[in-house]
Amino acid sequence: MKSLVVYYSRSNNTETVAKEIAKAVKGEIKKIELIKEVSFFWAAVTALLGKEGKIKHVDFDFSDYENIFIGSPVWAGKTSTPINTFLNQADFTGKNVYVFLTQADEKTPSLVFESMTARIEARGGKVKDHFFMQTNMKSPLTSEQVTKSVEEWLKNFRDGSFRS
Ligand SMILES: Cc1cc2nc3c(=O)[nH]c(=O)nc-3n(C[C@H](O)[C@H](O)[C@H](O)COP(=O)(O)O)c2cc1C
């Protein structure tokens, strides 16, 4: 069961989580990048309005993978704009999808999970689970901080879902 981890990260927190997940599931990893990073203010406003960000070309052919992990930072209580673009373009038909988020707030970002789940399932995916990590805008997550939480989360899938 091959796994792919797709993520956007502006200040590396989501990237750190993405890398730990990829390591744990022996998956491949793909970074979504904006053509041009925008200011904090513009990122927040456009995310709040549910806009897409202009991203660099991504290969949307997922035929090699059964499991897709999708990671985003929370922006203004919503999904980040580059991930909006990705979710509006990708075809998740027949895929098991796992969503992960990072955010400064300690409260579970339930509305963001719900909104991502609805969009993924509208494009044929089955969202199996989700996971989030709280971050601190002053000091980025380190892989040491992330390893244990990711391992704990993935223990829920002892059935070998991610065996490569
Ligand atoms: C434009 C912007 C808006 C944000 N809005 C929120 C928010 O509404 N709630 C929250 O908990 N954190 C918010 N944050 C903090 C990020 O979600 C957090 O720092 C996240 O871990 C960043 O991930 P990254 O390092 O992968 O970019 C915001 C950060 C940015 C840049």
Image (tube, helix red, strand yellow):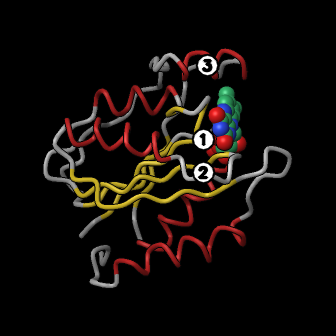
Query: Does 55 appear above or below 141?
Result: above
Can residue 129 be seen at all in this image of the molecule? Answer: yes
How many callouts does the rendering have?
A: 3
Which of the pair 110/81 is nearer the observer? 110
Across and down, in percent, residue 154 comes to 44, 75
* Ligand 1 neighbours mark 2 (CB distance < 8 Å): yes
Relative to 163, 149 lies left or right:
right
The residue under label 1 is 9
Which of the pair 99/61 is nearer the observer? 99
Identify the residue at horizontal 48%, vertical 59% (top origin).
Answer: 131
> Which numbered disc, 2 or 3, marks the residue that appears first in the sequence?
2
Across and down, in percent, residue 158 comes to 34, 84
Query: Does 139 appear above or below 160?
Result: above
In the image, which disc is placed on residue 15?
A: 2
* Ligand 1 neighbours mark 1 (CB distance < 8 Å): yes
Identify the residue at horizontal 14%, vertical 45% (top origin).
Answer: 93
In the image, which disc is placed on residue 36?
A: 3
Identify the residue at horizontal 48%, vertical 74% (top origin).
Answer: 24
Can residue 11 be seen at all in this image of the molecule? Answer: no
Please, what is the three-letter code of the amino acid marked with disc 3? Lys
Relative to 128, 104 lies left or right:
right
Disc 3, SS = loop
* Ligand 1 neighbours mark 3 (CB distance < 8 Å): no
State the separation of the CA atoms marked 2 and 3.
Answer: 18 Å
